[in-house]
Image (cartoon, rainbow, N blue to C red):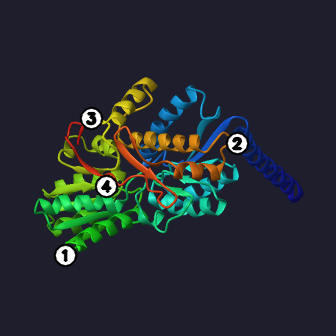
């Protein structure tokens, strides 16, 4: 029996190892046979799922357009995505798999706690890490040649939020934040902005990642009587906090950073979302003033029912657009190093009214931030 178990275990190991080797071989072969394979680890299930789903769909809308025209240098672009549920351990394992499978670049990772475990792997393997859906300074400073950021930082977002609040005379500001690298990055941004004005948060409270257990946080923050609460978490927990705070009688203002997932938050809150403010790092897809917004909305309509026009999918679309521009500049036989050079050569330009800039010494494309407000009927006003 023991020998039989050993034989079965060896067979299982051989099958598993063979499958993994075959998967890696197939991706490597795809890279050389006319495809560019990007690897994405993101939340596709769980309380943050809409962030991963919408970013991926937005990117796919643009990549599908490019592929329909023959790709870049006759190479089609595909995203291989793996679900990490917005959990760092799962993301770390997914990243190991994607790098072992020799993906061309890592693209569109969702979140700070996941990205901070993935980036060191990317750097070690010398694989470009492009357009993570996070504004954490820990991923930007110090500068690294393999990391390219499309969006503004959380420091940029929280600075605008604090400026808006204090200009309105609202100086008693509390912070509700996720108890991980993301939440702490946002808290640091708020604290930095308040310190510059001689202020500090009147209260702080946390929620665990992927949890909606907000009772203690509501009790702590409502007791402090803040004028406003700045929220640094994902849409499920932020919506839960707002609902419970309102039930407790709190009548102050709520501000969120872009990672919350604006449309997902609006969908969660319904009528209770009226007046909730969210900072945005992408042009509004609901305002046709910019050509990039019109282009995006038209592309989504052409893509059919599977795609939606919202801020998260807009970010995926813009990220894909920048990646393709860098790939085109990388030359006919593009590789990872020439992709880096291609992205760095983009310089300063306008993507339909959205200003971006990459250079050899600056891999943060944008510092654009503006504020939007939920209307309570599922719409977002900018």
Depicted 7 relative to depicted 63: above or below: below
- x and y, in percent, of residue 99 in the image: 66, 53
Q: Secondary structure at mark 4?
A: loop
Residue at mark 4 to residue at mark 1: CA–CA distance: 22 Å
Mark 1 — residue? 198
Q: Residues within 10 Å of mark 1 (few under 14, many from 20)?
A: few
Position in image of residue 273 (x %, y %): 22, 45
Q: Which mark is residue 257?
A: 4
Whole-percent x, y for residue 165 in the image: 17, 60
Task: Specify the quadrant that holds the N terminus.
Answer: bottom right
The residues tagged by marks 2 and 4 sit, at their Cα atoms, a distance apart of 36 Å
**In this orientation, which residue lies closer to the viewer: 357 or 87?**
357
Q: Is residue 266 visible?
A: yes
Mark 1–mark 3 contact, CB under 8 Å?
A: no
Q: CA distance from mark 4 to mark 3?
A: 23 Å
Q: Is residue 286 above or below residue 330?
A: above
Name the front one of labels 2 and 1. 1
Task: Answer left or right for 270 relative to 15.
Answer: left
Question: Is residue 10 left or right of 94 when viewed as pictured?
Answer: right
Residue 226 on image: x %, y %: 16, 65
- Front residue of 58 and 144: 144
- Which of pointers 4 and 3 lies earlier in the amino acid sequence? 4
Q: Residue at x 28, y 71 (%)?
A: 191
- Helix, strand or loop under label 3: loop
Name which of mark 3 and mark 2 comes first in the sequence.
2
Mark 3 highlights which residue?
Answer: 289
Mark 4 or mark 1: name the one nearer the start of the chain. Answer: 1
């Amino acid at each position: 029996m023991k020998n039989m178990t050993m034989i079965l275990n060896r067979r299982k190991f051989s099958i598993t190892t063979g499958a993994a080797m075959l998967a890696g071989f197939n991706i490597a072969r795809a890279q050389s046979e006319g495809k560019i394979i990007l690897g994405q680890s993101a939340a596709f299930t769980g309380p943050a799922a809409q962030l991963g789903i919408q970013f991926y769909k937005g990117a796919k809308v643009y990549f599908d357009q490019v592929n329909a025209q023959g790709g870049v240098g006759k190479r089609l672009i595909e995203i291989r995505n793996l679900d990490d549920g917005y959990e760092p351990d799962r993301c770390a394992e997914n990243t190991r798999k994607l790098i072992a499978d020799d993906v061309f670049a890592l693209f569109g990772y969702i979140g700070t706690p996941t990205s901070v475990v993935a980036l060191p792997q990317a750097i070690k393997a010398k694989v470009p890490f492009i357009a993570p859906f996070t504004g954490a300074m820990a991923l930007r400073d110090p500068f690294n040649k393999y990391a390219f950021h499309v969006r503004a930082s959380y420091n940029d977002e929280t600075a605008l939020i604090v400026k808006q609040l204090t200009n309105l005379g609202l100086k008693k500001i509390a912070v509700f934040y996720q108890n991980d690298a993301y939440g702490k990055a946002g808290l640091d941004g708020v604290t930095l902005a308040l310190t510059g004005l001689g202020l500090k948060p009147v209260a702080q409270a946390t929620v665990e990642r992927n949890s909606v257990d907000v009772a203690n946080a509501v009790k702590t923050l409502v007791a402090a009587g803040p004028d406003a609460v700045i929220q640094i978490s994902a849409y499920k927990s932020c919506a839960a906090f707002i609902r419970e705070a309102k039930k407790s009688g709190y009548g102050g203002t709520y501000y969120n950073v872009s990672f919350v997932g604006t449309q997902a938050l609006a969908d969660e809150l319904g009528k209770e979302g009226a007046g909730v403010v969210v900072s945005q790092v992408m042009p509004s897809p609901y305002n046709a003033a910019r050509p990039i917004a019109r282009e995006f909305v038209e592309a989504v309509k052409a893509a059919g029912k599977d795609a939606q026009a919202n801020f998260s999918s807009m970010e995926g679309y813009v990220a894909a657009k920048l990646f393709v521009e860098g790939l085109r500049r990388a030359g006919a036989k593009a590789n990872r190093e020439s992709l880096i050079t291609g992205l760095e050569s983009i310089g300063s330009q306008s993507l339909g009214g959205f200003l971006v800039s990459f250079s050899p010494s600056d891999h943060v494309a944008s510092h654009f931030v503006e504020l939007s407000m939920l209307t309570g009927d599922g719409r977002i006003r900018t």
